[in-house]
Image (cartoon, coloured by chain):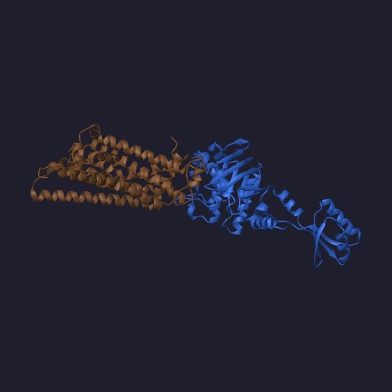
């Protein structure tokens, strides 16, 4: 649906984006994560037409919109990390104003914003002043505002910041509904746990480059595959340890209570064979599974530059 | 015709605010005070001397027009200096720029909204100016020219405020810079001419025998006089002088800055100065559009 190819942006001597590539599939809920200063906001500003890139392409459904801001603006709805509301303006006037900014007016605009207000649960707040609404309501109003021109892609920058858990939950439900209606949603957020349960796809940006991207299932599966194998044993553990020590795929073994933690480099078939060997040797296996990885762990691993530097220093030390 | 969305929102919001009502009340109160005190003084003079000077009533018109002009000149930057920076402070400018609204439409909407307020102020004050109609001497054409002069100064001051509001992130800085530049144009060009005139007088006195009486009166500010074409106060001064009976542009300015030769510029001073000021306003507006265009703007000042 939206594709960013080889995007470069420099602010003075600082390279904000270094050949960034993003591929957002149609109908996906794409989570965009990265540490502070990684280039998330710059990317979003370029996507929404608020900033021009030094080089690179932004493609929507295969069509290059880098030069044509009008096409880009019609295709994207933007919800920033602030509310952006006006004093002395009622909810319906606020929606009407943004509708007219997209060339919609009259009955068409009214029908459109009433549908959207109903969708975000603000239909009964039509005649309320925008600045009298709660944070959660303002956020929902901003979402409705971003959808007024029926965009193909909805871009949300830290949408849940400052919201209470209940409002966050309600907001997530609205996003899920929108996804079901076929909207493609791009969310930039720091709340990784929320992204992992909400998003279908994810991209991790660091130092202006995409360091990891793909479907969240695939990525978590890849993370899990490198995690230790947990074997829960009932009774005698010696026999199990003997079998494990004889396995070429086993790298390290650690015992904690009734659980054996094994760094196992084999694939799913090797795992099955190991389990069969243990059962055949009358080891009472109560549990056999890979430790579940999380997006947080992955994010920390990928963006830990101190660790990378430490490794580099270690490698460059003379005599090693 | 489709109404500019920014203009529509601005007038909706300003019509609800207490600020507009307060500005209108204060503006008209000051004008009314000026008119009534002036009338009182004229009538008292008639009672004392038993002589009716009809030129005094024209002076009421001129005086009120000047007060209104000065107030407009100083209110317009205040109305516009927070227009774009206010959007930036509310963080709504980025939202506007992500819509299909063009940067020039945003600037145009802002200018029209401030013009609307200015127009409301001018129209609401017209009954006070019309007081001079009671005694005669002022024609409808004079009022029309006066309105044109007000519009041109409002456009210049308004576009200046919008320009600095677009360039600077904070409204306070935009307001200070707008007033600074306005004072520089209004008082600066005058000061330069006065300085040039005093230097010229000094030279004339030193060169010729100081005993030759009146020779210093031949000194003038030279080509610096044309700097006053940028100055809306000078334009207004010349215009109101011609309306109040003295039709000589040359005489108006020469009484300030020494005798200057009659030429095409002097002959068409008001038209030419209004044209130059409108050109200056266009440059300010163009700069404002560039300053908010996402693809063209440079890093903004803090």
Image quarter where the C terminus of chain A lies is: bottom right
Count the labels in the image.
Answer: 0
Residue A122 visible in the picture: no
Residue B197 relative to residue B107: left or right: left
Point 27% across, 51% down: residue: B29
Chain B on-screen colour: brown
Residue A43 relative to residue B45: left or right: right
Q: Residue furthest top?
A: B264
Image quarter where the N terminus of chain A lies is: top right
Q: Residue furthest front?
A: A319
Residue B129 visible in the picture: yes
| Residue B155 vertical position relative to residue A163 in the rendered view, above or below | above
Q: Residue furthest left?
A: B50
Point 74% across, 51% down: residue: A222
| Residue B296 vertical position relative to residue A301 in the rendered view, above or below | above
Image x and y of residue B162, in percent: 39, 45
Q: Nearer the viewer, residue B22 or B158?
A: B158
Residue B101 relative to residue A65: left or right: left
Chain A on-screen colour: blue
Image x and y of residue B148, in percent: 29, 38
Point 26% across, 37% down: residue: B145
Q: Nearer the viewer, residue B176 or B62?
A: B176
Res A301 quadrant in image: bottom right
Residue A243 relative to residue B27: left or right: right
Image x and y of residue B168, in percent: 42, 49
Image x and y of residue A88, in percent: 44, 51
């Amino acid at each position: 649906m939206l594709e960013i190819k080889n995007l470069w942006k420099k602010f003075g001597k600082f390279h904000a984006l270094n050949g960034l590539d993003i591929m957002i599939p149609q109908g996906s809920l794409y989570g965009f994560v990265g540490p502070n200063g990684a280039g998330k906001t710059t990317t979003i500003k370029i996507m929404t037409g608020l900033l021009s890139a030094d080089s690179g392409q932004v493609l929507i459904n295969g069509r290059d919109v880098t030069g044509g801001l009008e096409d880009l603006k019609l295709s994207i709805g933007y919800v920033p990390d602030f509310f952006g509301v006006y004093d002395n303006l009622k909810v319906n006037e606020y929606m009407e104003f943004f509708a007219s900014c997209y060339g919609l007016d009259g009955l068409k605009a009214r029908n459109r914003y009433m549908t959207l207000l109903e969708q975000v649960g603000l239909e009964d707040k039509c005649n309320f002043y925008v600045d009298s609404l709660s944070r959660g309501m303002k956020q929902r109003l901003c979402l409705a505002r971003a959808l007024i021109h029926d965009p193909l892609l909805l871009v949300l920058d830290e949408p849940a910041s400052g919201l209470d858990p209940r409002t966050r939950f309600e907001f997530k439900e609205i996003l899920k509904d929108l996804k079901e209606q076929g909207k493609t949603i791009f969310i930039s957020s720091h709340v990784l746990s929320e992204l992992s349960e909400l998003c279908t796809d994810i991209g991790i940006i660091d130092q202006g480059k995409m360091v990891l991207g793909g479907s969240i299932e695939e990525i978590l599966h890849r993370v899990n595959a490198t995690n230790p194998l947990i074997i829960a044993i009932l009774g005698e553990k010696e026999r199990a340890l003997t079998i494990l020590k004889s396995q070429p795929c086993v790298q390290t073994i650690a015992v904690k209570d009734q659980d054996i933690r094994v760094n196992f480099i084999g694939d799913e078939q090797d795992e099955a064979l190991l389990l069969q060997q243990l059962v055949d040797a009358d080891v009472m296996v109560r549990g056999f599974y890979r430790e579940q990885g999380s997006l947080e762990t992955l994010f920390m691993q990928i963006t830990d530059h101190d660790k990378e530097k430490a490794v580099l220093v270690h490698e460059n030390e003379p005599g090693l | 015709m489709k109404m500019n969305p920014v203009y529509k929102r601005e007038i909706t919001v300003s019509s609800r605010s207490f600020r507009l009502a307060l500005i209108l009340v204060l503006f008209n109160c000051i004008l009314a005070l000026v008119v009534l005190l002036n009338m009182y003084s004229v009538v008292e003079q008639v009672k004392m001397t038993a002589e009716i000077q009809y030129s005094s009533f024209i002076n009421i018109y001129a005086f009120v027009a000047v007060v209104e002009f000065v107030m407009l000149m100083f209110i317009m930057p205040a109305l516009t200096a927070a227009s774009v920076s206010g959007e930036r402070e509310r963080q709504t400018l980025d939202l506007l720029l992500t819509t299909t609204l063009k940067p020039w439409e945003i600037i145009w909407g802002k200018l029209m909204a401030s013009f609307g307020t200015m127009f409301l102020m001018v129209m609401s004050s017209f009954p006070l100016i019309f007081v001079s109609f009671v005694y005669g001497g002022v024609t409808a054409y004079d009022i029309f020219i006066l309105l044109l002069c007000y519009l041109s100064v409002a456009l210049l001051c308004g576009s200046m405020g919008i320009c600095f509001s677009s360039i600077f992130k904070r409204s306070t800085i935009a307001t200070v810079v707008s007033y600074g530049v306005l004072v520089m144009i209004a008082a600066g060009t005058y000061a330069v001419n006065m300085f040039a005139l005093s230097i010229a007088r000094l030279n004339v006195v030193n060169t010729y025998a100081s005993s030759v009486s009146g020779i210093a009166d031949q000194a003038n500010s030279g080509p610096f006089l044309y700097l006053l074409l940028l100055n809306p106060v000078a334009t207004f001064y010349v215009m109101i002088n011609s309306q109040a009976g003295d039709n000589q542009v040359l005489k108006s300015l020469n009484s300030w800055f020494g005798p200057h030769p009659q030429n095409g510029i002097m002959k068409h001073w008001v038209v030419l100065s209004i044209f130059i000021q409108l050109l200056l306003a266009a440059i300010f507006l163009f700069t404002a559009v560039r300053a908010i265009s996402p693809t063209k703007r440079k890093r903004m000042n803090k």
